Amino acid sequence: MRTTWGSATDRGRVRPLNEDSLLAYPPVFMVADGMGGHSAGDVASRLAVEEFAQLAGRSTVTPDDVHDCIQRVAVRLRDAVDGGTAGTTVAGAAVVAHEGASYWLVFNIGDSRVYRWTGGELEQISVDHSVVQELVDSGEIHPDQAREHPERHVITRAVGTGSEPDPDYWLIPAAPADRLLICSDGLTSELDDPTIARLLAAEPDPQGAAQLLVTSAVEAGGRDNVSAVVVDVATVRDAVDTDSTVPPTAVHPSVWDDDVDGTTQPRPTRPAHPEVAP
Ligand code: MN
């Protein structure tokens, strides 16, 4: 599979440091949004990128590679920061192969996001681990209220916060002309989905699109660090005859062999929060 990509990040207008980090190098594309006092967040997000960078340059990775990466980030964070006050979100997509076909393994822990933009439609693949998402899910607030909610920055899962990291995974067939956006919450708290879709449509070059999105979020307020990775699928060798409207399938590496049958028929959706295998 051949991809083209671009990335941009900005400290924004308010925060003294940029504690976001990102990686854009096939087959792995990800952002990490670090948190913790005294630049601990900076350390945490960089450490996540360092681990994922070990997968860079391969043609594909396995779901277990990604899962192991996240576990290693947690272990290293525990060792690096005594007291466990540093944490990071991790969200991204990696190219995985199954029976000769290319898929995206989308992964998320925290409130950074992965979107797929295809045929002019923007679809959020990942689901935030946040207080606000829980309020939306329970019907207490409307999704439109989420972006201005006072607790919008409170996340319910992260890497490096003491407990075992508990990421979610989705599997989507890679299709030519698909564009993925991976971004930190500094982007989505400034720009709503229709604006993001309009900006992705306005700029065909992925580097230009990433820069345009970040610049627009900073101009819209820049209240947080802002990061974006944009990945375009140029060609897919041995592409399955795929329909991009196939809904993302939530998977877990431990059920990989049972779960993927090499077809692109819609598969039963796994629980959004699968158990992590011991
Ligand atoms: Mn942030």
Image (cartoon, helix red, strand yellow):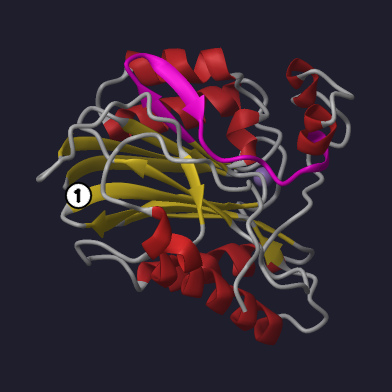
Name the residue that disc number 1 marks: 101
Task: From the viewer's side, name the closer residue of 207 and 248.
Answer: 248
Q: Please state if 20 lies on the left or on the right of 137 as rendered.
A: left
**Mark 1 Cα within 10 Å, few/some/many (few <14, many 20+)?**
some
Is the CB of mark 1 within 8 Å of ligand 1? Answer: no
The answer to which quarter of the image holds residue 151 is top right
Q: Answer with left or right where residue 239 lies relative to residue 247.
A: left
Seen at 42% across and 55% down, the residue is 259
In depth, the one of 175 and 275 nearer the eye is 275
Q: Is residue 201 above or below residue 146?
A: above
Tag 1: amino acid:
Ala
The reply, left or right, for residue 172 in relation to residue 14 is left
Residue at horizontal 10%, vertical 45%? 238
Give the residues drawn in magenta, as a range. Answer: 115-132
Name the element at disc 1.
strand
The quarter of the picture showing ligand 1: top right
Question: Horizontal and vertical percent for residue 275?
Answer: 65, 63
Q: Could you tell me residue 109's position as x and y percent? A: 62, 54
Q: Quadrant of the C terminus?
A: bottom right
Q: Is residue 48 above or below residue 190?
A: below
Residue under the image location 79 percent in, 76 percent down: 84
Q: Quadrant of residue 53?
A: bottom left
Q: Is residue 183 magenta?
A: no
